[in-house]
Amino acid sequence: MIEATQREGSISSIAFFTHGGDLGFYLNNDAGLFYNSSVVSPKPGAKTWDDIADAIKKGLIKFEENSTIFIDACNVGAISPSYFPGKDVSRLDALASKISRITGATVIAAVGHCEMQDQTKADGKFKISNREVEREGNETALYDWAPNGPNHAGFYKYQGGIESREDLGTEVNMDDYINKCEE
């Protein structure tokens, strides 16, 4: 992001395609991009979104006014109660809403397992699947299929904090959101 800001002056859109979860983007042996350092012990090379916030404050990273971040990583819009025992998770900030607050960008992210609609075609179309529910069983899955819950499976749009979350359904086309910020 720093290099993109240096090269382009600001960032209009970012698309992340990686493994993820409610605590961060899992890249290489825990050298990822995480919620903050209090919920994980990042390995060398890892960063947190608090690091990104500091770089934005210093002017090293700049986002355009109508920028968009599309995240194809499972559960970045979810909040796992197991990481916050005894807390009402409906009051906590999902990673996706934290990213939106920090960057000022509109963030599109999933609650649940997301994957390409057609595994043979990289066309920007994604879906929520119930693959993890089938593997783990309904009782232990991070997200649920019941409407209106904090971890209801689907894609969501965040503009600011968690209170701004808008349900986009279980299928999205990245181009519908990335192209809108460039118009």
Image: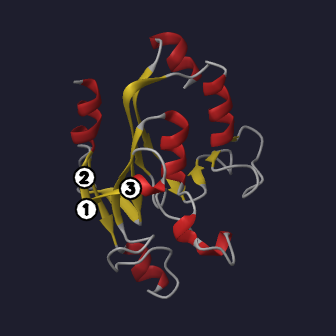
Task: Residue under label 3, please give it.
Answer: 165
Dot 2, crowdedness within 10 Å: few (<14), some or many (≥20)? many
Amino acid type, residue under disc 3 in the picture: Arg
- Residue 138 placement: quadrant: bottom left
Dot 1, crowdedness within 10 Å: few (<14), some or many (≥20)? few
Pick the front one: 170 or 156 = 156
Residue 158 at x, y percent in the picture:
40, 49
Amino acid type, residue under disc 2 in the picture: Val
Q: CA distance from mark 1 to mark 2?
A: 7 Å
167, above or below 102, in the image: below
Which quadrant would the C terminus be assigned to in this image? top left
Q: Residue at x 63, y 50 (%)?
A: 35
Secondary structure at numbered mark 2: strand
Residue 150 at x, y percent in the picture:
45, 70
- Residue 68 placement: quadrant: top left
Which quadrant would the N terminus be assigned to in this image? top right
151, above or below 11, in the image: below
Task: Residue under label 2, please give it.
Answer: 172
Which of marks 3 and 2 precedes in the sequence?
A: 3
Q: Residue at x 68, y 78 (%)?
A: 86
Task: Residue under label 1, please give it.
Answer: 169
Tell me the mark number nearer the camera, choosing from 2 and 3.
3
- Can residue 48 be seen here? The reply is no
Pick the front one: 138 or 180 = 180
Residue 16: assigned label: none
Marks 3 and 1 in Cβ contact (< 8 Å)? no
Dot 3, crowdedness within 10 Å: few (<14), some or many (≥20)? some
Residue 31 at x, y percent in the picture:
68, 45
Residue 12 at x, y percent in the picture:
38, 25
127, above or below 98, in the image: below
Marks 1 and 2 in Cβ contact (< 8 Å)? yes
